Image (cartoon, rainbow, N blue to C red):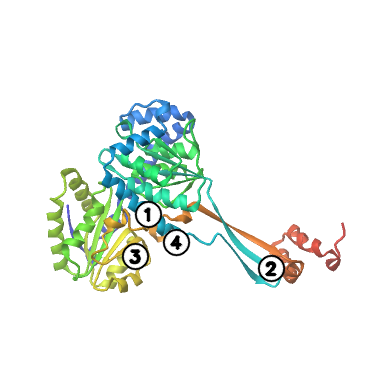
C-alpha cells in the first residue's frame, strides 16, 4: 500500500523497515544459498549444469557454458541497430569519465632529507563481473559500467557471468561485452555463478575479485564467499530516495521514484518532502504514473514502495536532509529550489542527481559516472564502482645512509617501547660502529 508518513510521528518499526529495505531478509537467503555454493566448490561444472537446469530451466552441455565467437556474431544479428548505437554512446561516455578518474600511475616525494617515498598502482590480474538478467529484465548497461573501468584500469583478464536466458543469453548483453572487450563470458547466473568465480571450476576460472549487482540470492552468495575472494561495492536490490521541496514538479518526483521501484519487488523507493500538500500531490501523480506501466512492472513498483518505501513528510529541509543521510541511498535525486546548495549538506549517497532534468534514468545508462552503487545503507562506508575497484596501491621507499641515520634513534625508541629487538638490530647493524654491534 502506498503511504504518506510524517517523519516525527513514524513508529520505530516503520522507520526501521524503511531504513533496512529488503536487506532485512538476506540472512535467511544466506542459509538457502550456502549449500549451492558449497556444491559448486566441490563438484564444479557438473553442479553448475544441474543448478542451471533447476533454477533457469536451461539444459546446457559443458561446452555451452562458455560463449563462443560465433555466439557473439549471432548476438549482433539479434540486436536492433539503435540499441547497438546506444551501447556505443554509453561505452564512449563511461570510458571518458573513468579515464579522467584514473590516479597517477606513480609518484615520489621527498619526505625529509635522504628519505624518498612514493606510490605505484598495479591493476588486478583477473576480475569477475556478474551481470544479472532474466526473461523479465536484462541489463546490458551493467556490462559497460563494470567492464569499462576494469579495462581502463588495465586488468589482465575480465571474466563475466550472466544467466543463460532461453539457453543463449541476452543478445544485447553479449554485444556490450564484446564492445567493452570482456575476455571470457559464461552462461551462468545466480548464486552458482558467484561460487564458480570464487572457487573456480573446470571451465570457469577462479578470480581475484567479484564485482556487480544482483538480487537477494546473489548478495547472499557474496557473503558466503567473502572469506575467499575480494568483493566490490555491495550492490543489491535497487533503491532511490528523492529529496524534494515544494518547487519540485510532483509528477517528476513521482516518476523518478518509480524508475527504480520498477526493478523488482525487493527494490526500495522513498520520497522525502517538506509539505503534506506536496506529498499528497506526489501520491496522486504516483498512482497515475503506475497505471501507465505494464502489469508486471506495476506490481514490482507497488511492492517496492509499499513494503520498503513511501512518502515521508519532514518539518523542514534540514530534517529531510538528516533522514537522507541516515538512509544513505544508492540513488539520491535532489529536486529543490537550489540543489547545488542542498547537496553541500549530503554526506551519504551512491550517486546524486541535481535538478529536475538530471533524470536518474539517464545516469543509469550513459552520462559517464558509474551506476553500480552501494545499496542497503552501505553508501555510508562504500563508494560507487570505479577504476579504484580494479587497481591496488603499493608504496615505494628509498633511504640514503644519511636519511636512515637521521631517524635511527627515533626507530630505536619505538623498538624499545614495543619490544622488537630484531627491528632494532636491523637499524643498528647498518651503523655498527656507532652502536658497537659486532657479529
In-image side of 4 versus 180 (left or right): left
Residue 178, given in percent of the width and then of the height, sits at 39, 42
Q: Distance between the residues labelled 2 and 4?
A: 31 Å
106 on left or right of 96: right
| Numbered disc 4: secondary structure | helix
Query: Could you say where residue 177 lies in the image, as x and y percent from the top left?
Result: 39, 43
Q: How crowded is the residue under tag 4: few (<14 C-alpha within 10 Å), some, or many (20+)?
A: few
Left or right placement of residue 249 versus residue 68 in this view: left
Q: Name the residue under label 2.
A: 115
Q: Which label number is shown at residue 325?
A: 3
In the image, 175 versus 252, the foreground residue is 175
Tag nearer the camera, 3 or 2: 2
Q: How far apart are marks 4 and 3 (CA)?
A: 28 Å
Residue at screen point 34% across, 42% down: 173
Q: Which label lies toward us, 2 or 1?
A: 1
Q: Residue 92, labelled with which disc?
A: 1
Question: Which class describes the residues within 10 Å of circle 3: few (<14), some (14-19), or many (20+)?
Answer: some
Task: State which tag comes first along the sequence, 2 or 1.
Answer: 1
Q: Which residue is drawn at 47% across and 31% down?
A: 203
Marks 3/1 in contact by CB < 8 Å: the verdict is no
Q: Marks 2 and 1, Cα distance to the nearest angstrom?
A: 42 Å
Q: Give the residue number, with chain letter if any, for mark 4.
A: 100
Amino acid at each position: 500500500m502506498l503511504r504518506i508518513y510524517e517523519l516525527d510521528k513514524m513508529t520505530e518499526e516503520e522507520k526501521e523497515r524503511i531504513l533496512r529495505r529488503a536487506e532485512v531478509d538476506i540472512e535467511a537467503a544466506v542459509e538457502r544459498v550456502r549449500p549451492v555454493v558449497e556444491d559448486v566448490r566441490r563438484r564444479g561444472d557438473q553442479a553448475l549444469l544441474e543448478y542451471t537446469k533447476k533454477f533457469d530451466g536451461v539444459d546446457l552441455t559443458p561446452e555451452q557454458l562458455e560463449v563462443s565467437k560465433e555466439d557473439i556474431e549471432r548476438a549482433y544479428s539479434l540486436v536492433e541497430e539503435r540499441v547497438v548505437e546506444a551501447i556505443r554512446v554509453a561505452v564512449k561516455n563511461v570510458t571518458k569519465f573513468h579515464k579522467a578518474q584514473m590516479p597517477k600511475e606513480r609518484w615520489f616525494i621527498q619526505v625529509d632529507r635522504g628519505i624518498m617515498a612514493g606510490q605505484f598502482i598495479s591493476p588486478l590480474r583477473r576480475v569477475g563481473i556478474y551481470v544479472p538478467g532474466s526473461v523479465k529484465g536484462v541489463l546490458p548497461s551493467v556490462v559497460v559500467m563494470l567492464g569499462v573501468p576494469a579495462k581502463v584500469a588495465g586488468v589482465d583478464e575480465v571474466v563475466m557471468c550472466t544467466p543463460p536466458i532461453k539457453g543463449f543469453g541476452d543478445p544485447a548483453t553479449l554485444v556490450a561485452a564484446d564492445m567493452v572487450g570482456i575476455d571470457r563470458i559464461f552462461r551462468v547466473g545466480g548464486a552458482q555463478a558467484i561460487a564458480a568465480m570464487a572457487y573456480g571450476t573446470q571451465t570457469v576460472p577462479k578470480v581475484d575479485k567479484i564485482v556487480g549487482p544482483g538480487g537477494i540470492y546473489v548478495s547472499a552468495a557474496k557473503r558466503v564467499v567473502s572469506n575467499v575472494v575480494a568483493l566490490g561495492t555491495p550492490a543489491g536490490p535497487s533503491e532511490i530516495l528523492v529529496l524534494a521541496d515544494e518547487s519540485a514538479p510532483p509528477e517528476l518526483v513521482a516518476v523518478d521514484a518509480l524508475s527504480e521501484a520498477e526493478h523488482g519487488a525487493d527494490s526500495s523507493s522513498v520520497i522525502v518532502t517538506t509539505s503534506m500538500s506536496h506529498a499528497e500531490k506526489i501520491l496522486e501523480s504516483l498512482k497515475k504514473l503506475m497505471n501507465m506501466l505494464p502489469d508486471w512492472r506495476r506490481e514490482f513498483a507497488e511492492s517496492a514502495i509499499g513494503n520498503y518505501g513511501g512518502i515521508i513528510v519532514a518539518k523542514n529541509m534540514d530534517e529531510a536532509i538528516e533522514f537522507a543521510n541516515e538512509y544513505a541511498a544508492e540513488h539520491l535525486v535532489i529536486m529543490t529550489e537550489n540543489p547545488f546548495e542542498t547537496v553541500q549538506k549530503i554526506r551519504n549517497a551512491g550517486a546524486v542527481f541535481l535538478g529536475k532534468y538530471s533524470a536518474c534514468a539517464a545516469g543509469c545508462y550513459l552520462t559517464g559516472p558509474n551506476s553500480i552503487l552501494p545499496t542497503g545503507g552501505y553508501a555510508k562506508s562504500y563508494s560507487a564502482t570505479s577504476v579504484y575497484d580494479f587497481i591496488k596501491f603499493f608504496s615505494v621507499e628509498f633511504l640514503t645512509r644519511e636519511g636512515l641515520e637521521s631517524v635511527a634513534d627515533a626507530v630505536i625508541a619505538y623498538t624499545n617501547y614495543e619490544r622488537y629487538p630484531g627491528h632494532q638490530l636491523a637499524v643498528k647493524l647498518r651503523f655498527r660502529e656507532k652502536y658497537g654491534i659486532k657479529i
